[in-house]
Amino acid sequence: MTTLIRMRPLFHPSIEEITVEGILHALSDPVRVAIYADIVSQECSQNCSTFLTVSDKTIPKSTLSQHFRELREAGLIRGERRGVEVHNTSRCTELEQRFPGLIRAIVNAHAIQLRDEQGKKRAAPRTTRRALTNK
């Protein structure tokens, strides 16, 4: 006998329920903004397990599912169950209509910050080497 397990439906707010405060809160976490920026940059839906490593950090599955819940409940992504997997897509088109330019500005700012951080990481070892040779 086969037993069907019913999963709770995923909550997605209507476009009218999405707020700037909710978006900014959801994207205030560095892991969530990195996940979201990656989803926005992709043409197809992204499986949650794609993000088990974010910014060179391993993310536990339980933590990852909480991050996706925050993004979904803020209205930033739409999740679709496919068997045991959840595939996520950005709601950029809807959000652009509601808040023109907001998502693009946030994603661009994140990219600039990421580029600056990577530049600092590359520059740091050179400074250390110079300091050691001058002693």
Image (cartoon, grey):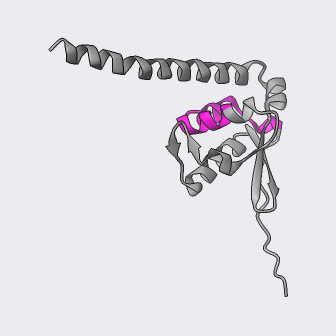
Q: What percent of the width, then of the height, locates residue 124?
A: 36, 20
Q: Quadrant of the N terminus?
A: bottom right
Please state which of residues 72 and 19 is positioned toward the viewer in this rendering.
72
Q: Is residue 56 left or right of residue 44?
A: left
Above or below, 127 against 57 in this view is above
Above or below, 24 against 86 in this view is above
Q: What percent of the width, then of the height, locates residue 71?
A: 67, 42
Q: How many marks?
A: 0
Q: Is the magenta region chiefly helix, strand or loop?
A: helix
Q: Quadrant of the C terminus?
A: top left
Q: Residue at x 82, y 76 (%)?
A: 4
Q: Residue at x 65, y 23 (%)?
A: 106
> Over which residues does the magenta segment extend?
15-37
In the rendered image, is residue 26 in sight? no
Q: Residue at x 58, y 57 (%)?
A: 62
Q: Is residue 116 left or right of residue 12?
A: left
Quadrant assignment, res 127 = top left
Q: What percent of the width, then of the height, locates residue 19?
A: 71, 33
Q: Is residue 6 left or right of residue 124?
A: right
Please state which of residues 105 and 111 is positioned toward the viewer in this rendering.
111
Q: Residue at x 68, y 18 (%)?
A: 105
